[in-house]
Image (cartoon, rainbow, N blue to C red):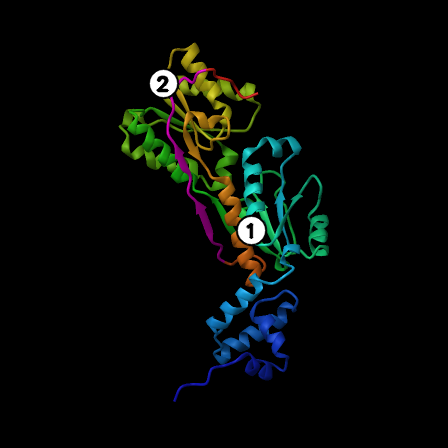
């Protein structure tokens, strides 16, 4: 004889609570005390309860078509040092633009929250998010400084863009930087450019768990020993101090190409080519509006922003809150722009 299916009303009767309480507990809804949620979920497991997939799909559909959803806000939190750093970064601008567009498509509103500038402490930011009833939070490509963000995470659905803060275990969306470097090295080999060097900042490596250098080392497997160049890993410093170091490194190894996500390194390649007669092109690993004319790698930041919204909305609708015991990772593939003639005509350095 087929065993009778365990229903929510059966669990409610056993637990001595209303069926609505069982429903909320099984969805890990933060409106219930954690102790109540744990007790009911444990009881459901013991009784052999399994959700009806058809009913779950119907509930999700109804939630997605509910009126008034446009009032729901997703918080996009950044921790840039100042206004200039934020607005001069094509990364932050594109992430926010992509996220905001996707949020609007799904019936949400995306608001920017500036941890450090507008909210100097976790407590002040936490209070505002709770007061406004915000459920979804995106940590938007945090910089390596000011990472001590401590919110009541069990109240929020959270997605990170990039790895930082590393101690917070949340679903993460980031660019596949390893694939981008390998793609660039493969394309350069097709153009018989084999003496290639990678210049990347140590804090960028921290952002993506060394994916730049990982892609570079894997890409070197196809090279002769004489063409293998050690990567140039540098600390952030003023441009006038850093460029001479890049030029010295490129001259030492007689580079034909500099790979970097720092878009003013085209100035180093230009000086090597024009002043020293060492034809060395710049290949951006994160091309912005100005450096796309050289060809290179486009990281597709708007798409990363959109994917982050997709993930956080999915969590909101399924009542997933708080940190994850085992976090998941979504990697967005970069794309390639064909190489253009070097040196470029009418070269203009970054202002």
Magenta-drawn stretch contains 43: no
Q: 55 or 224, which lies in front?
A: 55
Q: 102 or 83, which lies in front?
A: 102
C-alpha distance separating marks 2 and 1: 50 Å
Residue 78 percent location from the top left of the image:
62, 42
Residue 348 vertical position relative to residue 163 in the rendered view, above or below: above
Magenta-drawn stretch contains 341: yes
Q: Which mark is residue 105?
A: 1
Task: Provide the residue span drawn in magenta.
Answer: 326-345
Residue 86 percent location from the top left of the image:
61, 34
**Left or right for 1, reference 104:** left
Please tell me which residue is depicted at 63% across the width and 64% down the height of the picture: 30
From where the camera sits, is residue 167 visible? no
Please tell me which residue is depicted at 26% across the width and 28% down the height of the picture: 224
Label 1 sits on a secondary structure element that is: helix
Residue 43, image quadrant: bottom right
Residue 102 percent location from the top left of the image:
55, 48
Label 2 sits on a secondary structure element that is: loop
Q: Which mark is residue 115?
A: none
Residue 344 vertical position relative to residue 175 in the rendered view, above or below: above
Residue 24 vertical position relative to residue 290 in the rendered view, above or below: below
Query: Which residue position holds label 2?
Result: 254
Q: The C terminus lies in which quarter of the figure?
A: top right
Q: 206 or 344, which lies in front?
A: 344
Residue 259, image quadrant: top left
Residue 97 percent location from the top left of the image:
57, 41
């Amino acid at each position: 004889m087929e065993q009778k299916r365990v229903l929510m009303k059966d669990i409610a009767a056993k637990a001595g609570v209303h069926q609505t309480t069982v429903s909320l507990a099984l969805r890990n809804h933060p409106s219930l005390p954690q102790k109540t949620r744990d007790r009911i979920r444990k009881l459901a497991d013991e009784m052999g309860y399994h959700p009806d997939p058809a009913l779950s799909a119907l509930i999700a559909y109804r939630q997605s078509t509910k009126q008034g959803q446009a009032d729901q806000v997703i918080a996009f939190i950044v921790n840039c040092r100042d206004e200039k750093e934020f607005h001069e970064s094509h990364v932050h601008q594109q992430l926010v633009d992509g996220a905001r567009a996707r949020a609007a498509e799904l019936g949400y509103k995306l608001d920017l929250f500036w941890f450090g500038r507008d909210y100097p402490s976790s407590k002040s930011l936490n209070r505002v998010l709770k007061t406004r009833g915000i459920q979804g939070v995106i940590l938007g490509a945090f910089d390596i400084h000011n990472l001590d963000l401590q919110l009541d995470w069990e109240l929020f659905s959270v997605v990170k863009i990039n790895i930082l803060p590393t101690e917070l275990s949340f679903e993460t969306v980031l660019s596949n930087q390893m694939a981008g470097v390998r793609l660039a090295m493969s394309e350069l080999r097709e153009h018989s450019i084999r003496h290639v060097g990678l210049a990347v900042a140590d804090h960028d490596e921290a952002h993506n768990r060394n994916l730049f250098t990982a892609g570079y080392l894997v890409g070197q497997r196809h090279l002769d020993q004489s063409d293998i160049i050690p990567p140039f890993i540098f600390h952030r410093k003023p441009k006038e101090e850093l460029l001479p170091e890049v030029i010295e490194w490129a001259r030492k190894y007689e580079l034909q190409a500099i790979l970097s996500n720092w878009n003013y390194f085209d100035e180093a390649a230009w000086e090597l080519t024009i002043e020293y007669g060492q034809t060395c092109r710049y290949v951006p690993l994160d091309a912005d509006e100005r450096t796309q004319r050289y060809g290179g790698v486009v990281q597709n930041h708007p798409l990363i922003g959109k994917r982050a919204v997709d993930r956080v909305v999915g969590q909101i609708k399924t009542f997933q809150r708080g940190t994850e015991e085992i976090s998941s990772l979504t990697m967005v593939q970069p794309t390639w722009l064909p190489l253009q003639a070097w040196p470029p005509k009418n070269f203009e350095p970054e202002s």
